[in-house]
Amino acid sequence: MSVAAAFPLPDHRAMQETAPAPRARGLRDDDRAAIEACRRGEREAFDRLVERYQRDVYRICYRYVNDHHDASDMAQEVFLRAYKALDRFRGDSAFSTWLFRIAVNTCLNFRAARKPPAEELSETLPAGGEGALSRLENAERARQVRAALARLPEKQRATLILKTYHELSHEEVAQALGSTVGTVKANLFHALQNLRKLLVQAPAGEVRS
Amino acid sequence: MSEHLREEVLWEAMEAEPEGATAAHLAGCADCRRRLEEAKEALAWARDASVPEPSPLFWQGFRRNVSRRIEQRERWAMVGRVAAVTALAATLLVAVRVNGPGPIPAEPALPAWSALPAVEDDTGLDLLRELEGWSSDLPLVAASDVTSAVIELDDEQGALLADAVEREFAHPEEEDL
Ligand SMILES: [Zn+2]
């Protein structure tokens, strides 16, 4: 980033919530410092942001595509986009919220489908019906669930990932997906219904969007 | 039972103990109770499904790749600026040759037989025209405007141009992590 900041960052203290939240809703002090350093042209400061958020971003992408290599490529792309757009970050939300929004947009734009999903749903599952999934070993069940998640309709998938694993509020998810709170809630419920359907009823993947 | 609960309401019932009309409906509707229980079960499965953690070496390589790709982009942005300056200078040269040293009209009119391309036919400028926000007001017609256009080429415009230039060339393979 070779030009000076286009937008001054608002005062963090004014934005902090009084009650402790599981995830910072306002801009963290260390994020603010790193962003300001980036805007002064200190590239290493961006490395600190990458290190801080690489896992979250990678996990969003992984859950979206259920493939390590694709998730890795996509997560890199997310940080490139974030670096490029850093001057436009106004600081009125947590940096993570802004970054997750870029991650979701990158996922939604991911059209390549370079290869079929690495983990297909096992065809032996439905024989046992609902109880079968509960009896599976945890690791195997997690594998099945990740594979099913990656087969959900795109917006339901993105909604469920952001809400369930990254603790975004309904409003933040709605903002990230260009949606409304009501639609986010409905999508969450649809996503769970479809996830369950994929896991216990329909291995061929007939789901409602 | 007239109408079942909407999905939005059922999600709310998962997040907080249902009250009022929602609670009353659930008490009397086995169908909605079943949908709610099934969704709760799916949510529990979803929450349990963690992502496999890559090795520490992976993360080192990841950061190195991000850093390298940013450097690449910045190099392309520089190439883009040089390309823009070259294109603008070439246009200026054409304009000066056609119109002489005097004031240059906004749309230089060339005779139909001229070997020189009209500014709007110059394929070298297509790249610039493709750039979002540039198409309507490219300052290509007078020497002073050209100077200010070059000076005013900001990071975003440079990066847009870099992306366009990048698309014109084979993208270098990223090294595997
Ligand atoms: Zn009902």
Image (cartoon, helix red, strand yellow):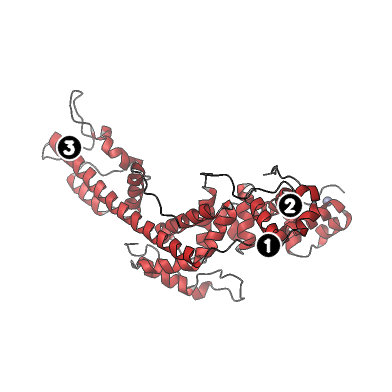
The image quadrant that residue A59 belongs to is: bottom right
| Residue A196 disc label | 2
Give the residue drawn at x 49%, y 68%: A52
Residue A22, position as x, y percentages in the image: 61, 71
Q: Earlier in the sequence, mark 1 or mark 3?
A: 1
Q: Residues within 10 Å of mark 1 (few under 14, many from 20)?
A: some
Q: Secondary structure at mark 2?
A: helix
Q: Secondary structure at mark 3?
A: helix
Q: Nearer the viewer, residue B174 or A181?
A: B174
| Residue B47 disc label | 1
Q: Is residue A137 left or right of residue A61?
A: right
Question: What residue type is disc 2 on?
Answer: Arg
Furthest residue to the left? B101
**What is the CA distance from the residue labelled 1 to the residue labelled 3?**
65 Å
**What is the CA distance from the residue labelled 2 to the residue labelled 1?**
13 Å
Q: Secondary structure at mark 1?
A: helix
Q: Is residue A170 visible?
A: no
Q: Is residue B141 above or below residue A70?
A: above
Callouts 2 and 1 on one subunit: no
Question: What residue sits right under mark 3 in the picture?
Answer: B94
Image quarter of the C terminus of chain A: top right
Q: Is residue B87 visible?
A: yes
Residue B41, position as x, y percentages in the image: 76, 58
Q: Nearer the viewer, residue B167 or B142?
A: B167
Cβ–Cβ under 8 Å for marks 3 and 2: no
Residue B49, position as x, y percentages in the image: 66, 60
Chain name for mark 2: A
Q: Is residue A41 above or below residue B109?
A: below
Q: Is residue A29 left or right of residue A183?
A: left
